[in-house]
Image (cartoon, rainbow, N blue to C red):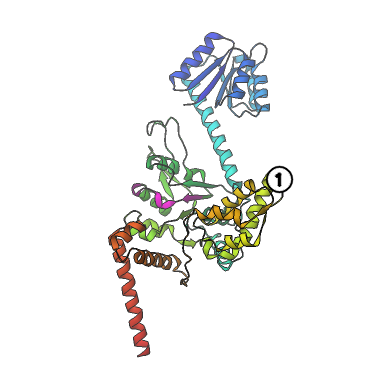
């Protein structure tokens, strides 16, 4: 279904065209006056304009010129008599999509219109792809802490590979930012990078967004639509919050990652693509697998190149640099001097635990840039913005390289178990995991600790 504007001074032909297209499920508006039609097209959102070539006052070529000069990108089809074919061809050189020669039948008209609408939709999608190449380019990873230097080095090593990347970390740590950095440093940097939030769509819509659909595949599928995998062919596809993909759809995703092939919804035609997938999650996918909410084979397929983004509380030395960066960017956007931060306020920011991580700090700096009028951010102003947020105790345990998430998980579980007085059911409910999962983890850690103690006894004995 498309939105079509028909312009013709011949009432009989105009209404006949409108009736034919309406029967084909299009929304049609008709105009006898080209000047009136021009105003409506500029104000409306038509995918296709069908206009007669010869009309009094303003002919079809003049209408086309006016539309293009006004920035209207609708596909224009010219209706022409036999003797005006040369004029129609000239109009196509000026940007018309096609012409149709009178007399024409209904099937011929509908076929040309369908192609014109598809062309308009593809142009719109291509524009979105172009924007995706530059979205987020101004955002950079700020920080000089050892963990950020390691992260930059890891991204540099991962980028040249075409393998799948799994980026794990808490919400707000900058996982998407890292994914874009990897794409920009990869051989696919000149190709599009598309993003899809897997948690924002229902299962049916998510399948259509990923793989596309054929016309008539389901209610509302009024045209062929390419999915993100097709649109990102040759480039990168970022699957944000990949842990939220429903189990039935995970099997189809696994096949794409393994075979680089898929079918659109409602189609039996197998299509091949070349897409690098970067997935992000704030979940512990190993626990998700244990709870039967994520396929184990998909987890291993995604985590070919795993990367962990540290929370802000583990790189407090970067807070002053981030504050300076965010305040500077906000000042530049608003065209005003950058806020200064007094020493006590900065000390408070550095020692705060930032449960919302870098995103929370960025939002605080944006808020300060708008609300602070005297140019100085003080501890009295900052403190109320932090006190209403639940703080997380600093994790002071030394984590093993390569086991960061595992050690963090263990410390959090043991801390929660202690707070719940050793009550396993309450602990599991607080953490959002099953009692059986909790028991298995505790048993696993006890056995590992016993093995370590036994090895130490043998070594010293």
Could you tell me which quadrant the C terminus lies in? bottom left
**Residue 245, position as x, y percentages in the image:** 39, 48
Q: Work out whether residue 177 or residue 108 is closer to the camera in this orientation and state it.
A: 177
Q: Work out whether residue 5 or residue 432 is closer to the camera in this orientation and state it.
A: 432
Q: Work out whether residue 328 or residue 153 is closer to the camera in this orientation and state it.
A: 328
> Could you tell whether 114 is left or right of 83 in the image?
left
Name the residue located 46 percent from the left edge and 56 percent from the top edge: 390
Q: Work out whether residue 148 or residue 207 is closer to the camera in this orientation and state it.
A: 148
Q: Residue furthest front?
A: 380
Is residue 131 in sight in this rendering? yes
Mark 1, other Cα within 10 Å: few <14 / some 14–19 / many ≥20:
few
- Tell me: residue 447, above or below residue 49: below
- Tell me: residue 306, above or below residue 240: below
Is residue 148 in sight in this rendering? no
Name the residue located 56 percent from the left edge and 64 percent from the top edge: 316
- Tell me: residue 154, above or below residue 222: below
Q: Residue furthest bottom?
A: 461
> Could you tell whether 18 is left or right of 64 in the image?
left
**Residue 368, position as x, y percentages in the image:** 62, 50
When asked about the image quadrant of residue 206, the answer is top left
**Residue 276, position as x, y percentages in the image:** 50, 53
Q: Which residue is mark 1?
A: 335
**Residue 136, position as x, y percentages in the image:** 59, 49
Magenta segment boundaries in residue numbering: 237-248
Label 1: element kind: loop
Q: Is residue 246 magenta?
A: yes
Looking at the rendered structure, the number of numbered marks drawn on it comes to 1
């Amino acid at each position: 279904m498309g939105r079509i504007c028909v312009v013709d001074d011949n009432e009989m032909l105009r209404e006949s065209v409108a009736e034919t297209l309406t029967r084909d499920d299009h929304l049609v508006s008709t105009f006898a006056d080209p000047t009136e039609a021009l105003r409506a097209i500029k104000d409306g959102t038509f995918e296709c304009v069908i206009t007669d070539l010869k009309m009094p006052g303003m002919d079809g070529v003049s209408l086309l010129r006016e539309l293009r000069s006004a920035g209207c990108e609708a596909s224009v089809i010219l209706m022409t008599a036999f003797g005006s074919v040369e004029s129609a061809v000239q109009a196509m050189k000026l940007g018309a999509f096609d012409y149709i020669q009178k007399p024409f039948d209904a099937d011929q008209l509908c076929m040309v219109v369908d192609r014109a609408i598809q062309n308009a939709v593809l142009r719109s999608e291509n524009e979105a792809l172009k924007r995706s190449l530059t979205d987020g380019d101004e955002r950079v990873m700020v920080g000089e802490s050892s963990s950020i230097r390691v992260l930059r080095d890891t991204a540099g090593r991962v980028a040249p590979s075409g393998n799948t990347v799994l980026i794990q970390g808490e919400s707000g740590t900058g996982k998407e930012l890292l994914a874009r950095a990897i794409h920009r440093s990869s051989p696919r940097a000149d190709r599009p990078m598309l993003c899809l939030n897997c948690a924002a769509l229902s299962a049916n819509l998510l399948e259509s967004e990923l793989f596309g659909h054929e016309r008539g595949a389901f209610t509302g599928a009024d045209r062929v639509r390419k999915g993100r995998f097709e649109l990102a062919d040759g480039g990168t596809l970022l699957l944000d919050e990949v842990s939220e993909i429903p189990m039935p759809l995970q099997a189809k995703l696994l096949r794409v990652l393994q075979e680089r092939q898929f079918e659109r919804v409602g189609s039996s035609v197998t299509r091949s693509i070349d897409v690098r997938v970067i997935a992000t999650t704030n979940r512990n996918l190993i626990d998700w697998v244990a709870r039967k909410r994520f396929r184990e084979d998909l987890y291993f397929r995604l985590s070919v190149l795993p990367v962990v983004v540290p929370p802000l509380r583990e790189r407090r030395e970067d807070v002053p640099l981030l504050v300076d960066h965010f305040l500077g960017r906000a000042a530049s956007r608003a065209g005003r001097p950058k806020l200064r931060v007094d020493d006590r306020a900065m000390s408070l920011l550095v020692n705060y635990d930032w449960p919302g991580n870098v995103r929370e700090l960025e939002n605080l700096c944006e808020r300060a840039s708008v609300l602070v009028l005297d140019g100085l951010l003080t501890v009295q102003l900052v403190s109320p913005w932090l006190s209403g947020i639940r703080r997380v105790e600093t994790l002071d345990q030394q984590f093993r390289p390569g086991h960061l998430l595992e050690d963090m998980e263990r410390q959090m579980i043991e801390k929660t178990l202690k707070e719940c007085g050793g009550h396993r059911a309450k602990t599991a409910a607080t953490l959002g995991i099953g009692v059986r999962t909790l028991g298995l983890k505790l048993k696993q850690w006890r056995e590992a600790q016993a093995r370590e103690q036994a090895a130490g006894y043998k070594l010293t004995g």
